[in-house]
């Protein structure tokens, strides 16, 4: 079966929760967000920051800057970092 989702490692410009366009690196596909209880097409980290862990958060899923989004949130693809 052909996968219509982008490959892990793809860099995209996508809408974030503030309706702003942000550059992201896709690190996973077809993800379940246990914090929101929703399913998403992608999990990613923002660029150029990459993954960061915040140790002072109480909930284990709130201690990082990973971002979940759907394919429809993508506005464009990036050629390189």
Image (cartoon, rainbow, N blue to C red):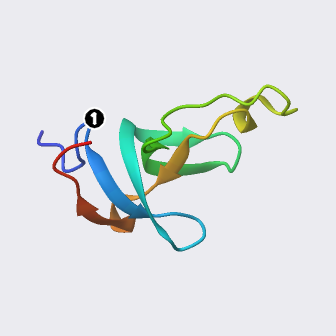
Q: Is residue 39 above or below residue 56?
A: below
Q: Quick one: quadrant of the N terminus?
A: top left
Between 34 and 24, the one lying in front of the other is 24
Q: Is residue 23 left or right of residue 75?
A: right
Which of the 4 quarters of the picture holds residue 59? Answer: top right
Tally of numbered tags? 1
Q: Residues within 10 Å of mark 1 (few under 14, many from 20)?
A: few
Between 56 and 58, the one lying in front of the other is 56
Image position, residue 58 (x, y; %): 88, 32
Q: Is residue 35 left or right of residue 44?
A: right
Residue at far left of view: 2
Image position, residue 17 (x, y; %): 59, 65
Q: Is residue 51 above or below residue 68?
A: above
Residue pictured at 30% horizontal, 54% vertical: 12
Mark 1 highlights which residue?
Answer: 9
Image position, residue 38 (x, y; %): 59, 52
Residue pictured at 61% horizontal, 40% vertical: 65
Q: Is residue 80 above or below residue 13?
A: above
Q: Quick one: quadrant of the C terminus?
A: top left
Kind of element beneath mark 1: loop
Q: Is residue 53 left or right of residue 78?
A: right
Residue pictured at 60% horizontal, 70% vertical: 18
Q: Is residue 29 left or right of residue 40?
A: left
Residue pictured at 16% horizontal, 49% vertical: 79
């Amino acid at each position: 079966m052909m996968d219509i989702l982008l490959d892990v490692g793809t860099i995209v410009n996508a809408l974030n929760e503030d309706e702003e366009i942000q550059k992201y690196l896709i690190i996973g596909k077809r993800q379940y967000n246990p914090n929101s209880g929703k399913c998403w097409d992608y999990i990613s980290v923002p660029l150029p920051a990459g993954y960061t862990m915040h140790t002072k958060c109480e909930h284990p899923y709130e201690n990082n800057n990973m971002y979940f989004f759907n394919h429809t949130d993508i506005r464009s693809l990036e050629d390189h970092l």
